[in-house]
Image (cartoon, rainbow, N blue to C red):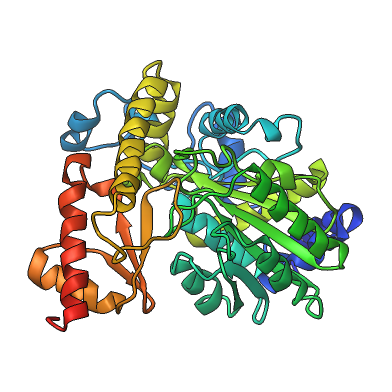
Amino acid sequence: MNTLAQQLNDTIAAQSPNVLNMLSGLGKAIYFPKIGILSQGAEAKQKANRYNATIGMATENGIPMHLDIIQRTLSAYDPKDIYEYAPPAGKQELRTVWRDKMLKENPSMVGVKTSLPIVTNALTHGLSIVADLFADSGDAIVIPDKNWENYELTFGIRRGAEMVYYPLYNADNRFNADGLRDALLAQKSKGKAIVLLNFPNNPTGYTPDAEEGREIVAALKDAAEAGINVVAVTDDAYFGLFFENSLQESLFGQLCGLHERILPIKIDGATKEEYVWGFRVGFITYGGLPEAVLSSLEQKTLGIIRATISSGAHPSQTFVLHALKSPEFETQKQQKFDIMKGRANKVKQLLDSGKFGDDLPYYEFNSGYFMCLKLAVDAESVRQRLLDAYGVGTIALGSSDLRVAFSCTEESDLEDLFDRIHQAVLDVKSGKA
């Protein structure tokens, strides 16, 4: 094993031995090179005051070389903020500003030891880093039965982990904390579990309330006290889009420092929060551990980044940073939130109006981009009928669930949308489709 990797492992073992046991084989072996092109280039940037002939980047007249046809569309930005390589961990100021934003929006994080957020190529990349660092073949990935399908690709197909499911809702249509606890405790013989907490949930748009949040935290603590090392990942992709009396912050803060066998990891980003899906700017943050261990995990994360994408896109990081620092940011973001909340409320009003009888029952939702119908007819047949006869696209999940994204439908069009969905359901029920 490389000496640098061994040093990181020794640091983790000395202060948080359970965390060392959570790492995958790759997670133990990975490191960020201290001696090499990046480190020598960084040294040259500080000391080479005559010529810096280290980095594979072209310059002209003292600034990054660029094409005018591109710069004309980006003239508001200094070339050094868009053409140069971004650091593997991301722009330092962006990381700091994002941390300040997290602390403001998550009061439970105030005073908690965390790493500085590391920039990822959006949230999927952050989850992929978690998979590489912590998931080995056969490890348990504990997720609800209503989940984002990419989890299976990221953790199951790529890393060979075992997907362990529990029902998202209990009999009272609330979060099934008992099911989560049972799924975790069932991993006692393995001694390790990776749990993904995705709120607002994709596909259902459900976020637990404060009481349910405490039950989730208690379930994870019970697993830790039973001797299970728990990698607790909060997938906060849709953070902030809380429309009703649900949790208004991530569970990450409550999990930090909860138990020595719990490693909290926060995955979030500008993708949905700031409505910049194509920018691909996300973050990964570790918490609740000694500084030296957090630093070691950061170095291993940078090793994964260096070995895969080298570093994230610089222009999009600059654009996001510019937005976050703008005095107009909060006002404009609130405007978009109000639109999204209006759409969600309209959907619930329509479905609760009695207009559709018993044909469009739905899973409880209160946040995010989506809601999910629980149909008594085949969801795939309804999906196909909607496409072929009514020009409507939806997502069928399993035999009964139909995901509908109100995020991309104008509020004034929602009644027509659900009228069409209702008619397609009636068509399938009557055998027309």
Q: Is residue 113 left or right of residue 225?
A: left
The N terminus - image quarter: bottom right
Relative image position of residue 2 (x, y in whole percent): 74, 66
Front in this rendered view, residue 377 or 227? 377
The outermost residue toward the top is: 327
Residue at x-position 52% and y-position 71% = 145
Residue at x-position 71% and y-position 53% = 215
Q: Is residue 88 left or right of residue 418?
A: right
Front in this rendered view, residue 377 or 228? 377
Position of 183 relative to 125 (above/below)? below
Front in this rendered view, residue 208 or 309? 208
- Residue 24 can be seen, yes or no: no
Residue at x-position 87% and y-position 62% = 225
Relative image position of residue 253 (x, y in whole percent): 69, 41
Front in this rendered view, residue 107 or 341? 341
Residue at x-position 43% and y-position 44% = 281
The C terminus - image quarter: bottom left
The outermost residue toward the right is: 14
Q: How many numbered callouts? A: 0
Residue 400 figure quarter: bottom left
- Residue 224 can be seen, yes or no: yes
Residue 160 figure quarter: bottom right
Relative image position of residue 100 (x, y in whole percent): 59, 27
Q: Is residue 208 left or right of residue 35?
A: left
Position of 78 relative to 426 (above/below)? above
Relative image position of residue 104 (x, y in whole percent): 59, 26
